[in-house]
Image (tube, grey):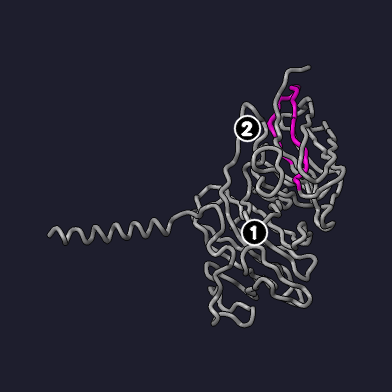
Amino acid sequence: MQGLVLLPVLLCATYHIALSANNVTVADGLLDNGNFEQAPNASNMKGTVVVGRYAIPGWVNEGFVEYIKSGQKQGDMLLVVPEGAYAVRLGNEASIKQEIKVVKGMYYSITFSAARTCAQEERLNVTVAPDSGVMPIQTVYSSSGWDNYAWAFKTQSDAVMLIIHNPGVEEDPACGPLIDAVAIKALYPPRPTNKNIMKNGGFEEGPYIFPNTPWGVLIPPNIEDDNSPLPAWVVESLKAVKYIDSAHYFVPQGRRAVELVGGKESAIAQITRTIVGKTYRLSFSVGDANNSCAGSLVVEAFAGKATLKVPYESKGTGGFKRAALRFVAVSNRTRIMFLSTFYTMRSDDFSSLCGPVVDDVKLLSIRNP
């Protein structure tokens, strides 16, 4: 009789474990087959074209999708894959999508590698319903032709569908963008402290950075988006800013910083709470990322109507200096913004945009001098 009782208990326990495994939320890092190294079966391939919606393990594909091997040639162009040996190319109106287990109500960022091929005005739509964003990828920031992009969303359920879609309509579908290395990271909204009114002033909270790609992560203009992959900050400009890490770049403080790579078209801002009539001190670090960005760099800082230009002579080998701006608040909300005065190219390849690094931003009220 005892054996008869144990069997249903064992079955119940086994079912519970399987159910729990299926409901495990996604961890920070690559998505399931996020680097596309698990290839479709040969029966699901017609040349480079993927045949069948479920042919790529972990993904659902719609439309003209190609499976690209690193080193493959397209005309005179050699296609190189940054993460592993394989990537996918999205033709006209093609998309790839994956369901992800998440925590309802949390913020997440998606990081992915993309490269344009023939078309100059290529862009990508990234969607996690009801949020959606357009990623312009026509400007290339790295000499490899690949850039990493970040986009953020807030979940409304415990399972979401990530869709990466090429909205382009080109005569040649082989001119679509290449996609590789799709990753996710949970974001935790930062709060001000009694030591710093700025939120995420050290930029430590931000999108996932691939350990094997030394290009940082581009945070595109997101002034119209509800969520930022750089919590508390908004990129309110025409060009992206670059999120960098201490593993690949020189960072003034901590493990993360921001590089302003698009001149005056590359700006970050944050709205902070202030008290009218009080005096405040905004301090921050300006430097270079040890990426051959040499020359005269200038960061412009804005705090409401107060402004400060901070020159920095860069040798391109890493370094920084501190700067400070005092101002009297004229509103209960003050906009703090940083931008780069000049456009700068790296001295080692003359094709990659670069710029000054901003880090360790602090804002405190002080007694009137």
Question: In this rendering, is residue 82 above or below 319?
Answer: below
**Helix, strand or loop: magenta stretch:** strand
Residue drawn 78% across and 69% down? 119
Residue highlighted by disc 1: 112
Q: Is residue 276 magenta?
A: yes
Residue highlighted by disc 2: 192
Q: Is residue 36 magenta?
A: no
Residue 298 shown left or right of residue 69 in the figure: right
Q: Which residues are magenta?
A: 269-290
- Answer whether residue 265 is visible to the viewer in this image: no
Q: Earlier in the sequence, mark 1 or mark 2?
A: 1
327 or 346: nearer the eye? 346
Looking at the rendered structure, the secondary structure element under dot 1 is: strand
Please state which amino acid type lies under the numbered disc 1.
Answer: Phe
Residue drawn 27% across and 61% down? 11
85 or 115: nearer the eye? 85
Q: Which x, y percent locates residue 254?
A: 65, 39
Residue 10 shown left or right of residue 129 in the figure: left
- Where the N terminus falls, by quadrant? bottom left
Picture mark count: 2
Please state which amino acid type lies under the numbered disc 2.
Answer: Pro
Q: Which x, y percent locates residue 54?
A: 53, 73
Residue 192 shown left or right of residue 177 in the figure: left
Q: Which x, y percent locates residue 197?
A: 66, 30
Question: Which label sits in the foreground, 1 or 2?
Answer: 1
Residue drawn 68% across and 31% down? 273
